[in-house]
Amino acid sequence: MFQETIWALLPSVVAISLALFTKEVYSSLFVGIVTGGLLYAGFNPIAAFDHLYKNGFIAVIADPYNAGILIFLVILGIIVALMNSAGGSAAFGEFAKAKIKSKTGAQILTIIFGMMIFIDDYFNCLTVGSIMRPVSDKHKISRAKLAYLIDATAAPICIIAPISSWAAAVAGFVEGEDGFTIFLRAIPYNYYAILTIVMLFTISILKLDFGPMLKHEINAQNGDLTSSSSSAASSDISLPVNEKGRVIDLIFPVITLIVFCVIGMLYSGGFFNAAENPGLVTAFSNSDASVGLAMGSLTALIITIIFYLKRGVLNFKQCMDSIPEGFKQMVPAILILVFAWSLKAMTDSLGAKEFVAGVIAGSAQGLVNFLPAIIFIVGCFLAFATGTSWGTFGILIPIVVAIFQNSDPTLMIISISACMAGAVCGDHCSPISDTTIMASAGAQCNHINHVNTQLPYAMLCAVISFITYIIAGFTRTPWIALPLGILITVAILYSIKYSFKYNNTQTGYDKGTENDN
């Protein structure tokens, strides 16, 4: 009765609404999961319990891809605990404090690191968070602001990077075409991703915060970095810190992690298979991020422990003590991820994808020039409701290809890019998105705080992107809509800056940051 109808979206709507209203994510996701199970079973409680247990929790934990991501999460938590205990994080924080003189510089460095680590969004969020958290803390950047900087340079960068797990996913959904070439041609039209990066640099240079983020930044200036007493905001690891730690004790594990995770992804894509002998790009396209990240991080963990033992900054017992501590730091992220995956399993079983696909396919005719903008909005809504970008690609891209493949190849490229941009935007805003959860974990920020503070920034960028897609639908070129979108973004942010200048001065926020340089 509820299959492939609008009711299929109800579990996600319930979970998201409760999370935003109650500020408590665990119970909100659980209620959404139970709602999905009841709808699937026709409100038979026994059948509903059986469905959400077997096809929800057990299925998502047993899924090999999900299991690999959980392994990567745990290992990364352990590596971070090791770096902290060895004194590497503290040493890097002191080094950065001496070299990076301003809050603006710390934010821009975070953005640059985020842009450099474009292989995978999970890897991006957790790695950049580990590197930059000591620096941002030193410059009194709130954890919410750090989470936003991390999140906004994760998926938006991966979706315009040709060598990434996201490029591989998109290329796989374009049937009957050269998926990688389509991805490359769509990059200049990916307005949400590009404008998000423009917004990041602009707000950092202007020292601009607005919406709920402003309150968090004011609190950070007064010493409260988390603006939360909730246990969801991870506390610092409680192991003793070696005061003899050096910057190399952070840099070496991070570089080792990056190198071996890249090698792991290439291995999973068959790069080292002499019989197949695929090229670098092909290997990344065929890679399994879950396998690559799990293998790479495990190798990096072993090498890091050996490195610390050789350096004498940690003994074997201290290394082993870091394992449960690192695991504990990742428990909130793991719990939210498992709940979010289970919620997605419920909506999938109710046919949410099929319902949305039918709506789009039935209304596509006659829209023509407005279709990219409409596809963008639908992608935003679907990714927000389901918490998955890749699932949104899988629904919308085949529909777009079927409509325009033989009639209007240029509009097909623009619409595919709108699919990707809308999916990233919705994923960016959604409290049940795994990337959003990872960003909260990487920044050790209360998850709902991250969602609430990020939303105004993402929504502003979404509105501007919608306008640019309308323009692109008519002009059929990125070189008119994109410059206009950039100009509009910068102009609006300048307007916000000066309209709020008086209020910010009254709170003492500008006084605390204008002299930061």
Image (tube, rainbow, N blue to C red):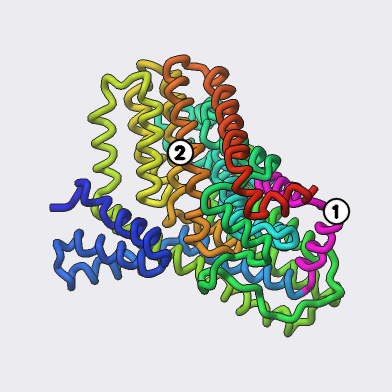
The label number, if any, that marks residue 172 in the structure image: 2
Q: Secondary structure at mark 2?
A: helix
Q: Residue at x 37, y 19 (%)?
A: 369
Total count of labels? 2
Q: Residues within 10 Å of mark 1 (few under 14, many from 20)?
A: few
Please state the extent of the stretch shown in magenta in the rendering: 86-114
Could you say where residue 11 lies in the image, as x and y percent from the top left? 28, 57
The residue that label 1 is drawn on is 99
| Residue 412, image quadrant | top left
Mark yes or no: residue 265 visible.
no
Mark yes or no: residue 50 visible.
yes
Q: Residue at x 71, y 62 (%)?
A: 137
Above or below 266: residue 36: below
Amino acid on which disc 2 is placed: Gly
Could you say where residue 86 lies in the image, as x and y percent from the top left? 78, 73
Q: Is residue 179 left or right of residue 121?
A: left
Q: Is residue 172 magenta?
A: no
Q: Main secondary structure of the magenta part?
A: helix
Of residues 442 and 324, the one drawn nearer to the viewer in this rendering: 442
Q: Residue at x 32, y 55 (%)?
A: 12
| Residue 97, image quadrant | bottom right
Q: Is residue 89 magenta?
A: yes
